[in-house]
Image (cartoon, grey):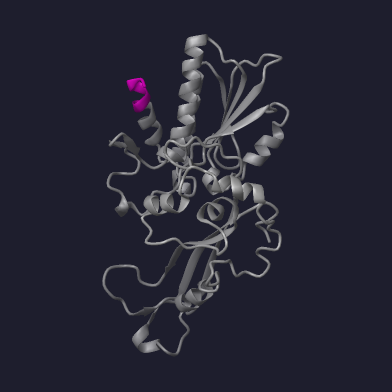
Amino acid sequence: MRDNYLEEFYSFLRFPSVSTDDQYREKLKQCADWLVKKLTSIGLETQLVPTKGHPIVWARNKHQPGRRTVLIYGHYDVQPPDPLELWDSPPFEPVLKNDYVFARGATDNKGQILAHILGIQETIEEHRELPANLHLVIEGEEEIGSGNLGPFLSQNRDALKCDVGVVSDTGMIARGVPTLSYGLRGVTALEIKITGPKMDLHSGVFGGAVANPITALAQLLATLHDRQGRVAIAGFYDRVKPLEDWEREAWRKLPVDGDKLILEETGAPELFGEAGYNSMERIWARPTAEINGIGGGYQGKGTKTVIASHAMAKLTFRLVPEQEGDE
């Protein structure tokens, strides 16, 4: 690997391209501009496509009739870095430790998309052209649901026709095990907010007389799953098709111990999930409901005896074919 490649990676990672927070809007634009400059410099026709949200970077080589067309997808936006106190180094100042680069976005998805770009660059430098027609589509809203990607694809449907699409934004089964991902679960998200008194109250004065929104939220969230790990929402599984026997058998034959891998990687004390399925089946092909965050009341050090005025929770649902998020 060329020395300058690592520095280019660091430059890419230094952009705090957090799409979930509007305060980073200008940083996302700067990150997209950096990509346009990089892709143009290696010989690709590149444009920055405005959307109602964050822009899409679209690059292509000079297409020739009779050649196959490859479309490579990626995204330059990243997840929020919070909680910052859990980082050993600043999230947007890359650090190399034991041959790993630590920074927000290093593996989701800036590392992968830059690897594609550098591979394209070296191929052009060695052979003066690519062996196929190419499109690169790099969006800035993957972490918030890709709301403007669909309209972009529809508007450019004919121009973007391809023989194969490549997405390097998934995962590998295990180190040293070649992996081809042929499907992903979908996702839908929501936020629950329960309100109570018009302001936080002193629990010594009002405790026992006023309902606590945090207690109500905890009771509600406790009904999300049954004791066997199944989602307890009525109708949640109505559209879910059973796994095919051939698929389950193929996964059982994989040269890895899925349970062991997950325990080692996560550090969880034990595994838990929907009864009747192994860990790989649960994370690859079964729908789930997860509580991603809870807030309300006093969160500082020590004790503050309040009854919160409100409580909130953020949830996501991983969905499988035939399930609809709106339902």
Give the answer, above or below, for where 233 lies relative to 163: below
Question: From this viewpoint, is residue 30 visible?
Answer: no
Instruction: Please give the name of the residue rendered at 27% of the width and 68% of the height, measured from the top-left corner.
Output: 301
Give the answer, above or below, for where 188 lies relative to 102: below
Quadrant location of the C terminus in the rendered image: bottom right
Q: In the image, is 311 to the left or to the right of 226?
A: left
Q: How many tags in the picture?
A: 0
Instruction: Please give the name of the residue rendered at 51% of the width and 20% of the height, measured from the top-left corner.
Output: 120
Instruction: Please give the name of the residue rendered at 36% of the width and 84% of the height, measured from the top-left corner.
Output: 203
Q: Which quadrant would residue 5 be assigned to in this image?
A: top left
Camera-side residue of 200 and 317: 317
The image position of residue 168, as x and y in percent, is: 52, 35
Q: In the image, is 202 to the left or to the right of 271?
A: left
Q: Which quadrant would residue 138 be assigned to in this image?
A: top right
Q: Magenta stretch mostly in which secondary structure?
A: helix
**Residue 159 lies within the magenta run:** no
Question: From this viewpoint, is residue 58 visible?
Answer: yes
Camera-side residue of 20 and 241: 241
Which stretch is magenta? 1-7
Q: Which quadrant would residue 174 be assigned to in this image?
A: top left
Camera-side residue of 252 and 234: 252
**Residue 3 lies within the magenta run:** yes
Give the answer, above or below, for where 132 lies relative to 229: above
The image position of residue 270, as x and y in percent, is: 40, 62
Quadrant location of the N terminus in the rendered image: top left
Instruction: Please give the name of the residue rendered at 35% of the width and 20% of the height, measured from the top-left corner.
Output: 2
